[in-house]
Image (tube, grey):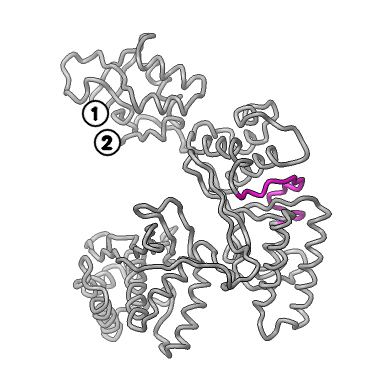
Amino acid sequence: MSTFTYAKVGQYGKEVVTYIERNKGVLKATDQKKYTIYTGKDGTYSLFADLIKKEKFDAAETLLKTKQFEVIEPVVRPDRFTTLGWTQIEKSVFTSKTVKISTAQQEKITLLVIKNVLGDDGKTYKSFDEMFNAKKSEIRDIFPDLPKIPSWYNHFDLQFREITKTRNFPNGSYNVYLYDGKASFMDYVSDLVTSGNKYDNKGLGLYSKKDSWDPADIWLVKSQKIQDKYIEKFEQIKKNFIEGYYAENKFQSIKDINTILKDAYHKRDIVGISLKKSNQKTLKYTEFNLEANPNDQKLPDIKFDSIALDASYDEDRGFNSKTSYVYVTDKGQDSYKLAFKSNTGGGKIGNITYEFLPSAAASAFLGKVPKDKLKEWLIEQIKTEKDSSIYMPQGSMLKETFDPFYKQQWENKVKLIKKHFGDFTELDNFVDNLEKSYDKFGLSVKNSSMMQMVDFVWIMAKLKENKNLIKFLSMAYYFAQKKGQIYNFGPFGKLY
């Protein structure tokens, strides 16, 4: 049995309508039996088909959430199939390809929306519908299937309608709207702070990825002349960096870059914006790292709540769980969970990833935690606590063989975890099951993620023992948001 979700109405609607019309109303249901639905003009199907043919997928989705197809045959049928709902249709007989919008496509469309609303060149439109359906629509060129994903279509429609009304949003006139490429500010600033400039190979090399410093997905620039003026200032910093001016404190260079960017932001000359999906009801905008004095920035207090770890084991599949959580609260109000989870794409052993997700009352995803920043912080703690055993979990640090010494190490880790956090599902059997997994699979994707997750819980136990757990979780919380001038994060606004 394979079922539809309502979010798939746009993706499968046309194929379902074609199937029903070709088969004269006959559909296969999730009980694997065939039912004939009513297709007359006064029925639910007729309304649904009309909306699908007009590509009003959002309205079709809304319709099927409240109404179902009337069934006329067989006369005798189970009560739950008196009518046939969208989620009762057997999905496996349909073959429409998954419609998915990429991050780059999302960002390019938002940039076009902002260009239309705030830009001082080109044609302007009165609505997002008009903009999408224009004869030479740039948005349709980017992602023609957008109407098939109503949640994203409505997201961009909300941006179009509400950007200029959104509190703190940097309204102004901008005429540089390059998403990326050689002449874009995005490309320039990314090369400036990372391992090298692709044009002259003389970047600062302070970050492995630009987003570890500033998560802006798009940059609004007033004019090419203004962009060139700021680039001159950044080039001087780069020149000073190369000549050793920042030798005693290389990160002073990024502080100086941030100071210039803050000034540019406040003048609305250059504005970096991080984009997140809205709730389609309200558009919000929050500014980060823009205080004149970094010490004036108030960072929230984080409270540790609990950990969720499942170490259960299956003889054939290996360890079952691929994701674990640390639950925290922000000032006792919003609740979040730090997900630390498997990263074994392509069947290769990778390093687990860390991302703050909303839990309970929290309303927004915070983002991924840059592992390089956490690693830096842990190294500092190692120096402080003189404990060289604390490290960020890495697939490359796992041993190829499970010898008695390695077994004892894991037993000691489990003991410390239980001392500080209590028991977890199947944790008592973890070491024995780990030994079994090595005997059967060796070091593989069937055990590597669980080993790293247990390792991470053990690290937190060590930090709790050293009275540094809250500080560590706070760092992760700030790093996920790229929040904190004292940690050298750049200025930006988040539109969500």
Name the spot of residue 310 as percent of width and height, x first: 26, 63
Left or right relative to 319: residue 393: right
Q: What amino acid is at disc 2? A: Met
- In the image, 377 versus 263, the foreground residue is 263
Q: Which residue shows up at 35% across the image and 28% down it?
A: 65
The percent coordinates of residue 472 (x first, y second) are 43, 74
The answer to whether any part of residue 341 appears in the image is: no
Outermost residue to the bottom: 386
Q: Is residue 53 visible?
A: yes
Which residue position is annotated with label 2? 1
Q: Which of the two labelled residues, at mark 1 and mark 2, occupies the earlier sequence position?
A: 2
- Picture quadrant of residue 17: top left
The residue tagged with tag 1: helix, strand or loop? loop
For the N terminus, the quadrant is top left
Residue occupied by mark 1 = 32
Taking the spot 79% from the left edge, 69% from the top edge, the residue there is 235
- Quarter of the image for residue 398 reads bottom left
* SS label for mark 2: loop
Quadrant assignment, res 92? top left
Residue 118 magenta-highlighted? no
What percent of the width, then of the height, locates residue 209?
60, 65
Foreground pick, 315 / 262: 262
The numbered mark at residue 387 is: none
Q: Residue at x 45, y 52 (%)?
A: 364
Q: Main secondary structure of the magenta part?
A: loop
Q: In the figure, 202 relative to 387: above or below? A: above
Q: Relative to the observer, which residue lies in front, 161 or 101?
A: 161
Q: Disc 1 vs disc 2: Cβ atoms closer than 8 Å?
A: yes
Region in magenta = 168-185
Which residue sits furthest front?
Answer: 296
**Cα distance between the residues tagged 1 and 2:** 8 Å
